[in-house]
Image: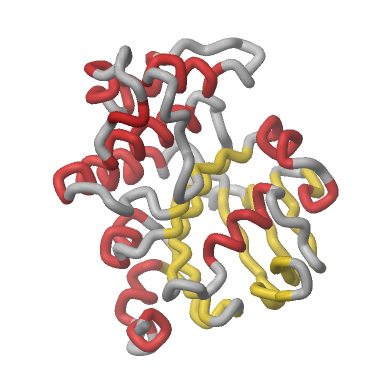
Amino acid sequence: MSEPETILDVQGLDAGYGRSQVLFDIDLSARKTGAIAILGRNGAGKTTLLKALIGELKPMRGRIRFDGLEAQDVTTERRVRHGMGYVPQEHAVFGKLTVQENLTLGAVSRRERPGIEMALDFFPKLGQRLGQQAGTLSGGERKMLAIGRALLGRPKLLMLDEPTEGVWVGVIEEIAHRLTDLRREISMLLVEQHVELALGVADYAYVVDRGHIALAGPADEVRDDARLLRYLAP
């Protein structure tokens, strides 16, 4: 059986905020299916990496090639239309809109105007909350809504920043189960503080330390690497 083709290829990426450089010479790649965990302590540069990939930050240097597109040269909107999806850590839903309105907004960017049923199949609990304002949902339900809305854009690559932060343990298990299924269909980058969950979902892992890739390899190998705890320690 042939290996899945590469969909994302990042080379020599430097990024930061103003004159403050956060990422240094990042090399990273992802296949068309499967999940990659991005691990590291708080402040290591994980969120900065996702923002640079989606276009919220302009790289200081480097190349981001996504499914044939030289993404570092185009807008966030163009990247999204080309198949990038992004669920940020915070402010991922419109709190004053209902669940149904949030999902409908997620679908309008596609020419074929898909319905919201795909998101409801993925997270059935959302079907019980369609008329409820998103801001009144539990933390776990808001995460489900944000992921479901992103999926309605039919991404080829879905980037998730802390999808289980502030989520009750029972909902964490449901989200992990759904992401495990999803990795068979699309490519995912998963920034996650729950290390065991991330390595359980992911096929491959990168560990970021002070803006550099300090460790990389198949998820099982990274889990067993004695250096992992050092790079995750506060």
Between 158 and 4, the residue placed more toward the observer is 158
Which quadrant is home to the C terminus? Answer: bottom left
Is 32 left or right of 163, judged from the image as shown?
Answer: right
* Residue 36 point in image, percent of width and height: 47, 58
Residue 187 visible to an observer of this rendering: no
The quarter holding residue 62 reads bottom right
Residue at image coords 22%, 17%: 128
Mark yes or no: residue 52 visible: yes
Taking the spot 39% from the left edge, 57% from the top edge, the residue there is: 202
Coloration mode:
secondary structure
Residue 157 located left or right of residue 95? right
Q: Residue at x 40, y 54 (%)?
A: 162
Query: Which quadrant of the structure image shows residue 28?
Result: bottom right
Left or right: 174 in relation to 13: left
Percent position (x, y) of residue 74?
82, 43
Q: Residue furthest left?
A: 170
Residue 97 position (above or below residue 13): above
Relative image position of residue 204 (x, y in whole percent)? 45, 63
